[in-house]
Image (cartoon, rainbow, N blue to C red):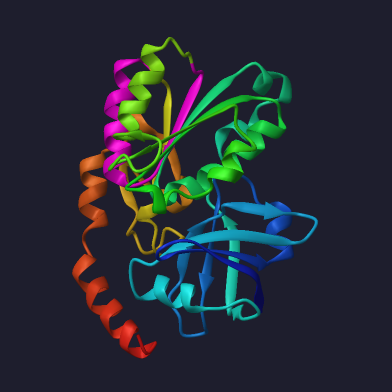
Amino acid sequence: MYRIVRKENLAPNICLMEVEAPRLAKSAQPGQFLIVRVNEHGERIPLTICDYDREKGTVTIVTQIVGSSSRRICHLDEGECFADVVGPLGQPSEFINETEDVLRSKRYLFIAGGLGTAPVYPQVKYLHEKGAKVDVIIGAKNKDLVIFEKEMSAVCDNLHICTDDGSYGKKGMVTDMLKDLMAAGNKYDQAVSIGPMIMMKFVTLTARQFDLPLIVSLNTLMVDGTGMCGACRVTIGGKTKFACVDGPEFDAYLVDFDEAMRRQGMYRSEEVEADHKCKIGLGE
């Protein structure tokens, strides 16, 4: 069993959990994900690893309630256990193959939207430890939904926050902040964007204007996590790939975002119905 040693509510309907999983923590790398099951009859849920502590033997996950399975996860308390935690899965971020000398010579920009801030954190933390220069943009709908601000500030050179309603940081979208940074003469060797699919699409369109190399993570498409279900099938550069085994990170300019968004919405009505039943089952 995999015990939850710490639980924290980061924002409305968003919870962080630190889970005992020594073998997973020992081998996890930035960009990878794991799969959890609440109980032996539970659904397999892929979640991006947002931190790991090799000495403590723990991994950290962040879950937002969007349906029945995520609601069951967030309903667990400290001291309780997941039936299964499997991983690490997926391909790690490409920069882990670079030497420290190379990383120290590079400057990165991360563009995070909403819950995507969580999987951005371990990548920024890793690069910071290797001596790379890293700037981060965090976007959220409002101040209450900004997460990981303190943690991110500790591991990046410059943190820029923007909210849709202007309740915190700069008012506007992450694309507005990206344009401001590029207009100010900032130069980046690589950008990475993680967040809602529609956000990553428009970040890609904006970054293209500046010839900015860009990687995106398609982790939100994953279901089974093994490639067998086919739910995360996506077209990359005209070829069929699976986000869970070939990714989840891909060259943004090769991604067919319109296809990916259609696939993401295929089971929305079924998930809404299942979540309604879950609420009743949990006594809410």
Q: What stretch is highlighted in magenta?
A: 188-211
Residue at position x 61%, y 59% from top? 60
Determine whether, in the image, residue 132 is placed left or right of residue 284: right
On the image, the x and y values in percent for residue 83 come to 58, 80
- Looking at this view, name the residue that lies furthest to the right: 55
Q: Is residue 59 above or below residue 194?
A: below
From the viewer's perspective, tell me whether residue 19 is left or right of residue 48: right
Residue 17: tell me if it is visible. Answer: yes
Q: Nearer the viewer, residue 82 or 224?
A: 82
In the rendered image, the quadrant that contains the C terminus is: bottom left
Q: How many labels does the image show?
A: 0
Quarter holding residue 82: bottom right
Which is nearer the eye, 97 or 65?
A: 65
Q: In which quarter of the image is residue 237?
A: top left
Residue 235 image point, x, y percent:
29, 41
Estimate the x, y position of residue 254 in percent, counting from the top left.
33, 31
Q: Which residue is drawn at 55% across and 50% down?
A: 32
> What residue is shown at x 40% (from left), y 36% (from top)?
169
Residue 239 visible to the viewer: no
Location of residue 22 in the rendering, given as x and y in whole percent from the top left corner: 74, 64
Q: Does the magenta stretch include residue 108?
A: no
Name the residue: 30% across, 77% down.
275
156 over 188 or under it: above or below: below
User: From the viewer's perspective, is 247 left or right of 263?
Assistant: right
